[in-house]
Image: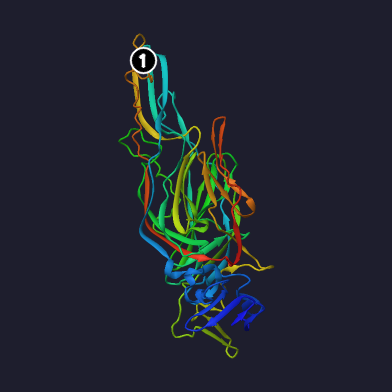
Amino acid sequence: MEDGGKCLLIGDEMAIWDEPTSGDKFAPYKHPEQHLKAVYFHSKNDYYAEAAAASVPVTHSAYPASAPSTWANDFYGLITITIYPDTYTVSRVLLTHNLGYVPKFLIADENYNELPASAPIQYANNEQGGTRFVRHYATTTQIVQVEYVVPGIGAMASLSKTYRVVVFRKPQADPSKPVFQAKRAGNVLIAGRGKVDYSEKHLRLAETGETVFHMPTEPVYDINNGQVRYVRSGGFWIESVTVRGATVVRYGGSLTSVDYLSVVA
Amino acid sequence: MATPRFSFKAGRVLMQDGSRTVLDTAAKSFNAVPGAVITIDPFTLSFPDFNSKGYRYLYGRQPGIEPFNYTYEICRTLARVNPEETTLPNVDLGALPAGTDFLESRIKLTRTLSPAKTWGSISPSQAGLYDWPSEIIPGQWMQLLGNSMIAERGDNWARLFEIVIIAGRAVLRRRQTVGTLGFETGQIEAKENSHSANASDSLRESNGGHCSFVNSNNYASTYAGVLEITPCSYRSGS
């Protein structure tokens, strides 16, 4: 079928694609991997279908300033070096999925900003070195958050966050199913032998009015002059600083914005 | 779960669950290409030693200590890393299908080579107090949202890696930075000395008995494990 420049073909495979302006009209159907931009759906491709999702409120604890540790103290106190070594690590399960394999996942904050694998979520007292990170990993049963806190010389206030987790199932065609099936009786609508089922949510670009995740399409970090800048959607960034006596060492790079997509999952 | 709907009209293919959009040519789904997944196992992520290393010299002196009017002196040298901005050579990770505009990546890495523990060694033969930092959770699958990650960072230094598309190929980029004034990682040597009031000092930086200036620490860091990259497309059009 063709309509308005779009093609739909259900044969050995199922595909939806933009009709090429020249050449073989069916090229995207035959070789989707060579015509990715033209292809909207192809039963040979995979899609990110939601297997589980949760919004998880977390109250991150307050921590006191690190106790100073005077190191290498000599008898007369002629040379003393003070460091602030306290750190805290807390692990928590954000979601139990029990899929039996390690799934792909995305994680975002309460504003649907997707978080990088290790994300600074709080700096204490601005220029006093304290940082709270969250890091995430997947197992065959869970999505786990590891919180790592370096209070530094200032106390770290408690912080309430909500983490939005989406776990994707392994895309798998079921050879016993047809390449496309639509039956009003029994509410059946599948494409690609079940890779896409109408009853599931799939990762795609957002439409107007939908609640969207902000997904980066390019690197969100930059480093310069010993410092790290992390740029979120909307051009908002947070960065580290180093203080050495009266000298403040700052990021001197130029990363101010990152392309973010609006997606639903 | 509502009523399934499928339509193809006015150049738009739409699959819905009631009014909820499932698949829509006006809001393209992420198309992943399973046949083009790049799995590198073993994958090695490495950062070399810092370019410039030195020392910071500390000296203290207390004269006139009774009952013998002797002088006490002490020196300490601290291992210092000097400022640098280093872009490491790119690592080619493999070809991508034409039209790939998004990489969904994940890693499972464990550090196999680590710099020495930092701060607190009383002498080079004694262990330091703190492991060299890392933001990679060892042996676990971490999703690389944004395809960039700080592998390691400390006060005034950081190491970054990212996976990007360059000329139709997946490429690993790495950089490391040490800020103005550098940073120190621990003690090289400490010495104490006492001498009579009329004897010369021996532990000043310019004296023959000075503390060692040699920062022999190797700050190279290496991770090994698995990298998996799934090429995707979300853009439509030519």
Is residue A6 or residue B152 the one in the foreground?
Answer: A6
Name the residue tied to disc 1: B201
Q: Position of residue B79 (x, y in %)?
A: 39, 33
Q: Position of residue A70 (x, y in %)?
A: 45, 33
In this rendering, the answer to whether B128 lies above or below A28 is: above
- Asked which quadrant contains residue B55, the reply is top left
| Residue at the far bottom in the pictured view | A185
Q: Residues within 10 Å of mark 1 (few under 14, many from 20)?
A: many
Q: Position of residue A152 (x, y in %)?
A: 52, 41
Q: Residue at x 58, y 71 (%)?
A: A21
In this rendering, the answer to whether B66 lies above or below A245 is: above
Q: Is residue A198 in view?
A: no
| Residue at the far right in the pictured view | A209
Numbered marks: total:
1
Q: Is residue A235 in view?
A: yes
Chain of the residue under the numbered disc 1 shown in the image:
B
Q: Secondary structure at mark 1?
A: loop
Q: Position of residue B61 (x, y in %)?
A: 41, 18
Q: Residue at x 51, y 64 (%)?
A: B99
